[in-house]
Amino acid sequence: MSVRATGLDREFSFRVRFGDFEVEISGSCDEVFKTVEMLPSLMANVSKAFEVAKTSKPSSNVAVSAFPVVSGSNCSEAVLKLLESDWGNEPRTLPELVDALKASALHYPSTTLSGVLTWLTKKGKVKRWKTDKGYVYSYVKKEEA
């Protein structure tokens, strides 16, 4: 939650986050305070709205990909954890790996990730091959090595 007051007219912004959703209330000081007084009933209604949004099915033309949450002391460790996960069972492109790492708040430039993937390929921990999507990467299971 964050509250921000700006300027001499005491304009307020009030922001609340619920998981993946966020609500911001902005207005004069009095308007925001009146809204905050109504907050318990307002939040109940907002929570209901978010539950409906969570349970509604996405349209068929929208691609939904749930990235695994990974951590690692370095880029190569995080990449291996991604590729070892269920999400990594399907060969993944460099941009997909960058996005998956970002979803775990691991922000590595694609050039760094490319170098790490090359190193992991040379070490025999990752396989790489060219497809119509570009190069894809897959984890080498121990029995394959």
Image: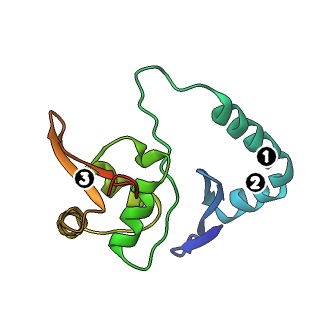
Visual colour scheme: rainbow
From the viewer's side, name the closer residue of 47 and 135.
Answer: 135
> Given the image, on which type of amino acid does mark 2 rest?
Thr
Residue 25: give x, y in percent of width and height. Answer: 63, 55
For mark 3, what is the residue?
A: 127
Is 119 on the left or on the right of 28, as rendered?
A: left
* Few, some or many residues within 10 Å of mark 2 (<14, 14–19, 20+): some
From the viewer's side, name the closer residue of 18 and 14.
Answer: 18
Q: Residue at x 19, y 37 (%)?
A: 133
Q: Residue at x 18, y 64 (%)?
A: 118
From the viewer's perspective, is residue 41 above or below residue 73?
above
Badge 3 element: strand
Q: Residue at x 41, y 67 (%)?
A: 78
For mark 1, what is the residue?
A: 42
From the viewer's perspective, is residue 39 above or below residue 57?
below
Badge 2 element: helix
Q: Quadrant of the C terminus?
A: bottom left
Is 124 on the left or on the right of 83, as rendered?
A: left
For mark 2, what is the residue?
A: 35
Badge 1 element: helix
Spatial CA distance of label 2 from label 3 is 56 Å
